[in-house]
Image (cartoon, rainbow, N blue to C red):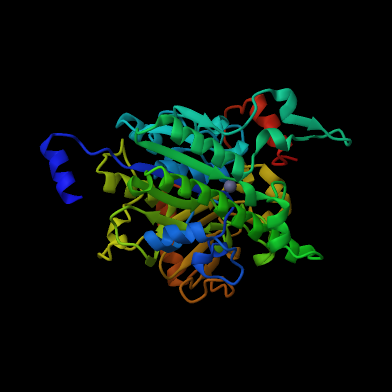
Amino acid sequence: MLLLGALLLACGTKPQPYNVILITLDTTRADYLSCYGSPNAANTPYFDGIAAQGTLFERAIAQASVTPVSHASILTGLYQYQHGVRVLYASSGYRLDPAVPRITTVLRDKGWRTGAFLSAFPVSEQFGFDTGFEVFDNGIQAATDTVLQESGDGRFRWNVARNQRRSDVTTDRAIAWIDEIGKDPFFTWIHYWDPHDMSLKPPAEVVSELVPRGTVGDEYRRKMYAAEVQYVDSQFGRLVEHLKATGKWDRTIVIVTSDHGEGLGDHDWWNHRILYQEQIRVPLLVRIPGETGGKRVSSIVRTIDAVPTLYDWLDVAPEGHIEGRTLLPLMRGEPDEPRIAYADQLNMYDTNANMVARRPNDDLLYCAVDDNWKLIYRPRHPDLSELYHIAEDPGELQNLYHKNHPEALRLRAYLDESGGYVDGPFGESMDEETKKRLEALGYVD
Ligand SMILES: [Zn+2]
C-alpha cells in the first residue's frame, strides 16, 4: 500500500479526499447506546463498532435541547447566540441564515458532493438547513393540503406520513444517493427521528423482541424507546455494510451524535426542552480511518467541537469564526485546554409545547458545564438555580446551589460574559406555512 501511495504521488495523482458521514440521532440519550454501558441501553452493535474503531466521548454536551437550535450548532460549530437559531417556534430566531457558513458550504466549496437525508420537519428547509446541499431529501411533502389533517375536535394535526419517516426509508435514500454519485467524495448528513416519540415504531418483530407483551405504563415507554434506538442502529448498520461492500468504508469518516436526549421520567419529566444531563448529555463517536480506535475520553466536550475536528483532520479552513475546537488532541491522548459547555433553553420566547404553562420555573434556562461543576441558571427565578458537582453527582441528585457558592459565581460569570442572554421576544413574522406545520406537530397550543 505504501508503495502504491508513493507511486500515485510520484505520478502527481492527488489521493481522493475522504468521505464524511455525519449522523444525528434525534432525541437519543447517550446511555441508551450499549457502548455507553448503561443497564437501560439498547443493543447497538453498529454504533459500538464506531466507538471501537474511533473515539467515544463519555461526556459530550449538546448546546440546546430542541431540534433546530442544537442542529444548527452541530453543523456550524457555533453557539446559538452566534449562528442565530434560538428557538423552534417564534416570530423569528428559528431559521439558520443562508449567510452563516456551515460544514455543508465549506466542504461543497472544496469539491465534496453534498447530500442530506433527513427524517422530520424540524430539520427541514423551513429552518434553513438546506443551504449548501445539492440534494436535500427529508421526505417532507410540499403540498400543504396533505401536511395537515383535521381531527374530529376541529384541530389540525400533523399528517405523520407526510412529515416524518422511519430510519429504514431514510437509509434507503442515502444508500441510493451514495451509489448514484459513484467515486466522488461525499459529505452526507443523515438524521434519524425514530426515538422522538412513539409514532414511528420499529417493525413488529423488533418490538416483540424488546417490549414483552403485557409491558405497560412507564416501563412500556422506556422499552419502546430502547427498541426505537436499536432499530436505528440496525438501519445505520445497513449503511455501514453497504460502504464496506462497495469499498468505500476505509475512506469514510463517521461522526455519530445527537441533538438532545430525553427525560424518560428522570427529574419528573419525559421529554426534552430542559437541561438536565438526560437531555443534554449526548452520544459523540468519531471514527477517522488511521486514527487509533477504542479510545474513551471523559473530559467535557461539546457538539460544536465535532465539525472543527473534521476541518482540522481534513486540513480544510473554516469560513469565518468558529467557536468549537478540534477534538484531535483528546483523541490522540495529547494535552488540551479544558472546556466549558454552554447550553440554553429560551422556553418563554419559544411557545413550542407550551413549556411555560407546564414548567413555569423553566421559562428561561442558561447552563454552563465543566469537568467538575454544572450550573443551571434561571434569571427570572435566581433562587431556583441549580448547581451540581457533576463529576461526583452525574445524576444531578444533590442541588448545591447557593448564590454565594464560589463555583456558582464562577459559572455565572461565564454565562454573564457569554453573550447568550436574550432579553425580549423575537421580532419579525414567521411565515404562515411554518406556523401551521408547527401547530400540527403539537408545538403550539
Ligand atoms: Zn430533536
Residue 349 is left or right of residue 111, and the answer is: right
Marks counted in the figure total 0
Q: Quadrant of the C terminus?
A: top right
Q: Classify 429 as above or below 214.
A: above
Q: Left or right: where does residue 431 sit relative to residue 404?
A: right
Q: Position of residue 403 (x, y in %)?
A: 51, 68
- Residue at image location 27% in from the left, 40% down from the top: 316
Picture coordinates of residue 34, whole percent (x, y):
53, 65
Q: Residue at x 71, y 55 (%)?
A: 205
Q: Is residue 48 visible?
A: yes
Residue 413 in sight: no
For the point 46% across and 73% down, the residue is 391
The one nearer the camera, 136 or 75, is: 136
The residue depicted at 48 percent of the width and 33 percent of the height is 177
Q: Position of residue 120 (x, y in %)?
A: 61, 39
- Between 427 and 129, the residue placed more toward the observer is 129
Give left or right: position of 299 versus 328: right
* 293 is higher (above) or lower (below) than 126: below
Q: Quadrant of residue 372?
A: bottom left
